[in-house]
Image (cartoon, rainbow, N blue to C red):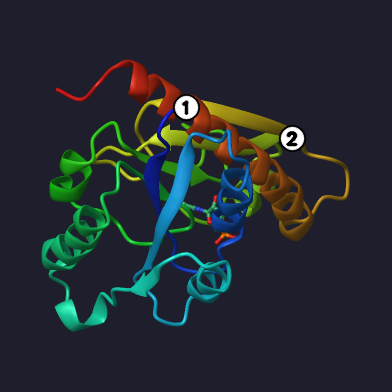
Amino acid sequence: MPPERIRVAVLASGRGSNMTALLDAAREPSYPAEIALVLSNNPDAPALRAAAEAGVAARAIDHRPYRGDREAHERAIDAALQQAGIGCVCLAGYMRLLTPWLTGRWAGRMLNIHPSLLPAHPGLHTHERVLEAGETRHGCTVHLVTEGMDEGPILGQATVPVLPGDTPDSLAVRVLAEEHVLYPAVLARHLAQMAAVPAA
Ligand code: GAR
């Protein structure tokens, strides 16, 4: 019998191209994850529509009614994750800062993808900042989520060269293509490691 697949949730706030890359990878029967749930804080996120069209349970949990009470919003997210029997969470363009409450609950089981070679350039506008700094290498990082924004142990990186004439948009396209390969590969590797070390 094939090993049981881990139920993974994707949290996305916008376009959802990394979510789609994870969904595509999980169509392969030997892939160790089943993408069982997609959540968004943004009811209008294209990611939600794409997930529903792909036949995946997709739900908005809007942060706005919580009026700045981040932990209350996260409790609703966590309840949805628990209800769906989720074992691992992938942040994919989820543009909310998380509190230590949620990151603590999912320690070692929550991954994020970021468009830079962390620890360089956490935060927004990474492509602009790489160009402004005159750097010759750029890329993306998948890391475990901890309390600090875009911090946490690095699980994998992919590098792209910065080419003469590059603009933030041209760099973004090249980095995003690498994100779509890196995230499914790193998730598979991480799930294999999680399975080898059962939770306490
Ligand atoms: C991706 O480039 C991802 O790395 C970035 O948002 C984009 C989402 O695109 N995430 C961050 O900047 C997190 N700090 P997508 O919705 O098409 O996957």
Task: Say if 86 sits above or below 190 in the image.
Answer: below
The answer to whether mark 2 and mark 1 are in CB contact below 8 A is no
Left or right: where 1 falls relative to 164: left
What amino acid type should be assigned to the residue bearing mark 2?
Val
Task: Say if 82 sits above or below 63 in the image.
Answer: above
Residue 53 is drawn in which quadrant? bottom right
Name the residue: 47% across, 40% down. Answer: 33
Q: Residues within 10 Å of mark 1 (few under 14, many from 20)?
A: few
Residue 37 position in % (x across, y down): 39, 59
Residue 129 position in % (x across, y down): 60, 48
Instruction: Residue under label 1, please give it.
Output: 1
The image quadrant where one finds ligand 1 is bottom right
Q: What is the C-alpha distance between the residues marked 2 and 1?
A: 40 Å
Task: Say if 91 sits above or below 53 in the image.
Answer: above
Label 1 secondary element: loop
Q: Residue furthest top?
A: 196
Residue 63 is drawn in which quadrant? bottom left
What amino acid type should be assigned to the residue bearing mark 1?
Met
Name the residue: 71% across, 56% down. Answer: 168
Q: Residues within 10 Å of mark 2 (few under 14, many from 20)?
A: some
Foreground mark, 2 or 1? 1
